[in-house]
Image (spheres, rainbow, N blue to C red):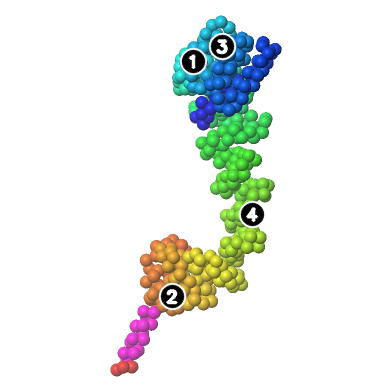
Amino acid sequence: MRIKYLLFLLVFFAGCSVKQPQIGEKVFPKEDDYIIKALLDEQNGDLKDALNIYKFLYKKTDKIIYFRRYLTILYDLGKYNEVIKKSDKFLSEQWDDEVFKIKIFALLQEKKLSEAKKELISKFNKKNEFFYTMMAFILTKEHKYKEALEYAKSGYALNPSKKNLLNLSDILVNEKKYNEAIAYLQTYLNEKGCDYDVCLSLAHIYKEVYDIPNLANIYEKLGRYNPEYYILALNYYMDEGDYKNALKIVKKHKLSQEYLMYIYEEKKEYKKAALVAMNLYLKTKDVKYLLKYTIFIYKATPNKQTVKEVVKNLEYIKNYIKTPFVYNFLGYLLIDNNINPKEGLKYVQKAITLNPYNTDYIDSLALGYYKLHKCKSAWDIIKTVDSDDETVLLHKKLIKRCLNDTKKNHKKNKRRFGKKKK
């Protein structure tokens, strides 16, 4: 289960210890001095000194508040059996709900589940939220989830607190009653807004049941606590192809323009992506954005005029970004558009030196030799390339045809040369 029970108990216990009754009138003159000293010892971690002071104060004044604090520190020191013994002695003489609760916690720490359950059923008020919460916890530890669920529901009905809600939700999830858990959590969310723990519990469930749209929606709500959740929501919307909500997140929460560029790229709206990329380049002077812009304008309008601009940009970019992609992109354009196939071949060869097994780069190399009318060399390069890419297949077809035509011409020339020689 998502919530660690020990943490749950400590939080619950802390809640009990904070709600203390008024100390009342002083029984002896220096009572306040002892109280202050005990509190300072607790604050400084001197629990044994604080323990002795509370023990002294209880004997001196007979005030239950001091006995509770005494038991609490014994508990914090891990002396659970001593807590149980002293609680039993106290409760045999007078009843106190808070002392009884501390005893129950100590029994649980000692793994005396049956004894704790028996004590709760026989001695504690059945209308008290604590009874149902603890019974749910014990039954869960005993793997009696159906019974635990009923107690958890009763506890939540008595006090619809966040703590009781999360406990109930965890048991429902354990029983794979996801829709019921969602209903409880969503009702709380609708009434009180996106509390971090509640929304996070909902997110875990939506992830468990692969409800991606609702998961993305919850992550967006969680973004108010940590902007990283906006990015998670954005990624989920993108995975679902929900570009409308993805754009809303970027614009509404003023995320980086890089995300806007990414969305336009995924939507294949290359002109818009190019505009964002250029704005980022002008703002940051980072050449990587100029490269992005160059890629996008080429994809948007791959005409002669665009190719000229792209080649010019790439000739500048290659001085800063020395990657095989850049070399191949520039080389391919010089080759494919017959601008300068010989120069283009040099750039492609640089790309292959850096990444010798890339199919696109090998295709560019073959195309370069083809453009230089070296069909046999081109065919020797591309014939072993296994690819379903339409461009590669087209180049393969052209090069093979060129090779066959070259062979035919060679035979004709040979025959003609032979006749002349005779």
Q: Quadrant of residue 319?
A: bottom right
The answer to whether residue 255 is magenta is no
Kind of residue indicated by mark 1? Glu
The picture places residue 219, in percent across and down from the top left corner, at 60, 40
Pair 2/4: label in front: 4
Q: Up-down: is 44 above or below 353?
A: above
Q: Are marks 3 and 4 in contact (CB under 8 Å)?
A: no
Q: Are marks 1 and 2 in contact (CB under 8 Å)?
A: no
In front of the other: 320 or 83: 83
Q: Please indicate, yes or no, whether residue 185 appears anywhere in the rendered image.
A: yes
Residue ID for mark 2: 369
Distance between the alpha carbons at the discs numbered 3 and 4 = 60 Å
Q: Are marks 3 and 2 in contact (CB under 8 Å)?
A: no
Q: Which mark is residue 131?
A: none
Pair 3/4: label in front: 3
The picture places residue 28, in percent across and down from the top left corner, at 66, 11
Q: Callout 1 environment at 10 Å: few (<14), some (14 to 19), or many (20+)?
A: some
Most distant residue in the left direction: 422
Residue ID for mark 4: 257
In front of the other: 120 or 420: 120
- Region of the chain picked out in magenta, as a range: 406-419
Q: Is residue 289 left or right of residue 372?
A: right
Kind of residue indicated by mark 4? Gln
Residue ID for mark 1: 82
